[in-house]
Image (cartoon, rainbow, N blue to C red):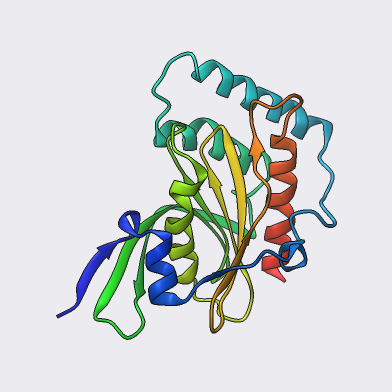
Amino acid sequence: MIQVKQARDVDLRYLIDNFGIELVSDEQFFHEWQDDLPELTDLDKQLLDKVKAGYVNLLNYPPLLEDVVRMAIVDPILFIGDFYLSPFYVRVEESVDIAVPDEDVTIKGRIDTLIFKGKLWVMIIESKNASFSIEEGLAQILAYMLASPNTEKPCYGMIATGSDFIFVKLEKGNPPRYALSKGFLTRNPGNELYDVLRILKRLTQIASI
C-alpha cells in the first residue's frame, strides 16, 4: 500500500536519506545568479521601490501571512518582470507527486507559484510567512524541484518570505545536487529587490534555452 507524505512535513534529512541529495559548496556550480544579469529600466526600479514601501508598511500590521507575502510582494515582482506575458504563464497551488526511490511512499504537495514556458518548468517559487526562516522552506522547495519533469537541465527555484529571498539550483543526477545563492533582504539599505528581479529574469532565460 502506497503511503502518502506531505511535502510540508519533509525535512532535509529525509531528502538526504531517501534521495541522496547533496549540497555543493563550489561557487562555480551555481554561478548563474551572479553572471550576465540583465539591467532593469527606470520604471522597473520605481515599481520595485513601491513594492518595498508596501512591504515596510505591512510590517506595521502583523501577522504577515503567506498569502499576503505572495499577493503584496511576489506577485508584483512577477508582474514587473513580465512573467504573466507570453511565452510564460503562471500557475499557483500546482499539485505535485514525488515517488520516493525504493519505497512505497509518495510525497504530495502544492507549489505556491510555478512559472511555465511550454511544458518546461522554468522557476518554482515558494512563499512563506514572514516570520519563517529560509531554512524552513528549503526542504519543501527541493522536494518540488525533484518532481520537475525536466531531467536534463538544471531546475531553479526561489524561496521568498517577503523579508528574505534566496535562489536554489538543483541538478538531477545520481545523486541530485543543489546549491544556494546568497540571501537578499528587503530591509537592507537601497533596494535588493532589484537584484531579485534581475536574477529571476536571468534564471528563466537560462532554463528556457
Q: Quadrant of the C terminus?
A: bottom right
View extreme (top): residue: 60
Residue 141, above or below 194: below
Task: Choose top left, top right, bottom left or bottom right for residue 95.
Answer: bottom left
Q: Which percent across, then down, holds residue 163?
A: 56, 32
Residue at 43% over, 76% down: 19
- Residue 100 falls in which quadrant of the image? bottom left
Name the side, left or right, on which 19 lies relative to 171.
left
The N terminus, quarter of image: bottom left
Q: Is residue 43 left or right of residue 76?
A: right
User: Taking 140 as reference, is 46 above or below it?
Assistant: above
Residue 15 shown left or right of residue 204 in the figure: left
| Residue 143 on image: x %, y % | 43, 64
x, y (%) of residue 114?
A: 50, 56
Residue 24: % across, % down = 64, 67
Q: Is residue 36 left or right of residue 100?
A: right
Residue at 82% from the left image edge and 50% from the top image edge:
38
User: How many marks do you count on the picture?
Assistant: 0
User: Where 179 falls versus 45 (above or below)?
Assistant: below
Which residue lies most toward the left here?
Answer: 1
| Front position in the image: 110 or 9 | 9
Q: Residue at x 56, y 82 (%)?
A: 173
Q: Nearer the viewer, residue 69 or 208?
A: 69
